[in-house]
Image (tube, rainbow, N blue to C red):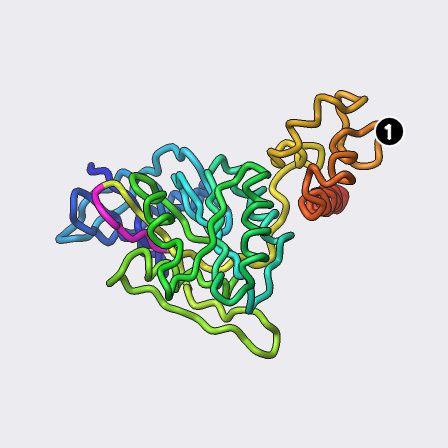
Amino acid sequence: MREGRVIRAISGFFDVFDDGNVVRCRARGVFKVKGTTVLVGDFVRYEPTGTQEGVIREVLERRTELIRPPIANVDHVVIACSFVTPDLNLYMLDKILLLASVARVEPTIAFTKADLASPENVRAICDLYRRAGYTAMAVAAKQALGVAEIRARLQGRVTVLAGPSGAGKSTLASALAPGMAFKTGEVSGKIGRGRQTTRHVELVRLDDDTWMADAPGFSQLQVPVASRDVKHHFPEFRAWADACAYRDCLHLDEEACAVRRAAEEGRVAPSRYASYRQLYQEAREQELNAY
């Protein structure tokens, strides 16, 4: 039995990287019976069955797992969000940041198409997220703005590029890994959203210990946490939460809520607080609809 990392999954076949070689494998039938899904990024044990072929016998324990994009053992996510075309959607960004936090994956925010936005807007948006505790960078991939800084953050990690369709993920991926085959997409003029260009998740090896995946665009994401726990995934709330009158304060409409007061006074970004309330409500509706 040998071990390797799944780098590609297409139509029931899994390409496993093992010591510089790629072995095309099938998963044993018992996985379907047990409900086990093999994901890109999984470390697996497989049995060779011929030249560059094998059968996956075991999926090893995952350190992390993302649901969408479906990928395992990721250390880092670069979230591409476009300033224009499609317009910047801060709620969707905040939802993806929540997803990364729940999965215990470190995020870097890449605000793409920065060359098409005003310098004042670029600076204001980046500063908003930096004050909230995130790494946020302005990027214009075709002009190489911010590309070197993003590339430095990939070293020694398994990174997934994520974000809404049309936000420039594939263009950024191609800039980060010149010569690699990444598709680039267009934005529909009719609906202002991107046409999804990446059809499957695939890990690309950049060097010995650095991998990157350009994943399909996010679509309808559920809030992946209980409503009462959404507040724990907004890092800027921590500075104010201890001052709330109630220990279990949800930072909604409770009396003497320090977090809500900080948002009203601008010490917590109002857009972030609005996203929190919306994400809480969405999670609560999911809970109610589950019964």
What is the quadrant of residue 181 in the picture?
bottom left
Q: Main secondary structure of the magenta part?
A: strand
Residue pushed farthest left?
Answer: 51
Q: On screen, 265 above or below 141?
A: above
The image quarter in which residue 46 lies: top left
Who's the residue at 72% across and 41% down the image? 266
* Number of marks: 1
Task: Write down the residue under mark 1.
Answer: 255
Examine the structure image and report whether residue 205 is included in the region drawn in magenta. yes
Does residue 149 appear in this view?
yes
Q: Which residues are magenta?
A: 202-208
Residue at left 18%, top 45%?
48
The foreground one among 254 and 23 is: 254
Q: Nearer the viewer, residue 57 or 69?
A: 69
Q: Residue at x 29, y 53 (%)?
A: 204
Q: Splitting the image into 4 quarters, where does residue 210 fall?
A: top left
**Residue at the image point whose x is 36% and y is 52% from the top:** 213
Q: Position of residue 211 (x, y in %)?
A: 30, 47
Q: Amino acid at mark 1?
A: Glu
